[in-house]
Image (tube, rainbow, N blue to C red):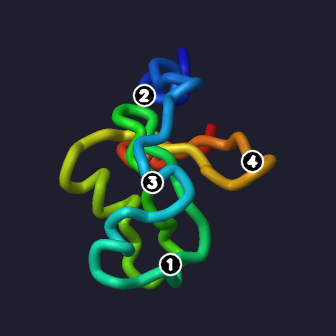
Amino acid sequence: MALCDDLDRASRDTTPAPPADACADCLAVGRDDWVHLRLCLSCGRVACCDSSPLRHATAHYEASGHPVMRSHEPGEEWRWCFRHEVLG
């Protein structure tokens, strides 16, 4: 049995939605002080991590229910399931 069905089902080749190199939610409120970026594997939204002041990746999960994101940092391939709190 898998630890997380959401991680098993999540796409590994999601195309980032524009802007692919920034948190669109931060930019919309005039901020560019995110720490790291995350990519929603359901819809491709790029958002800032929980170490960033506005934590838009978590807010996106809470609003959309899209459970799995991955790091959108160069050289990082790890994924996180918000629903089950499992790293994959």
Q: Left of 30 or right of it: where is 52?
A: right
Q: Which of these two is toward me, 43 or 7?
A: 43
Q: Are marks 1 and 4 in contact (CB under 8 Å)?
A: no
Give the mark nearer the N terminus: 1 vs 3.
Answer: 3
Q: Residue furthest left?
A: 63
Q: Left of 81 or right of it: where is 21?
A: right
Q: Residues within 10 Å of mark 2 (few under 14, many from 20)?
A: some
Q: Rounded to the nearest whole Å, what is the CA distance between mark 1 and mark 4?
A: 18 Å
Give the mark nearer the N terminus: 1 vs 4.
Answer: 1
Kindly identify which residue carries mark 2: 6
x then y, percent, for residue 74: 75, 51
Q: Amino acid at mark 4?
A: Glu
Q: Rounded to the nearest whole Å, what is the CA distance between mark 1 and mark 3?
A: 17 Å
Disc 2 is placed on an element classified as helix
Q: Rounded to the nearest whole Å, what is the CA distance between mark 1 and mark 2?
A: 25 Å
Kindly identify which residue carries mark 1: 52
Q: Residues within 10 Å of mark 3 (few under 14, many from 20)?
A: few
Kindly identify which residue carries mark 3: 19
Disc 4 is placed on an element classified as loop
Q: Residues within 10 Å of mark 4 (few under 14, many from 20)?
A: few
Q: Rounded to the nearest whole Å, what is the CA distance between mark 4 and mark 2?
A: 19 Å
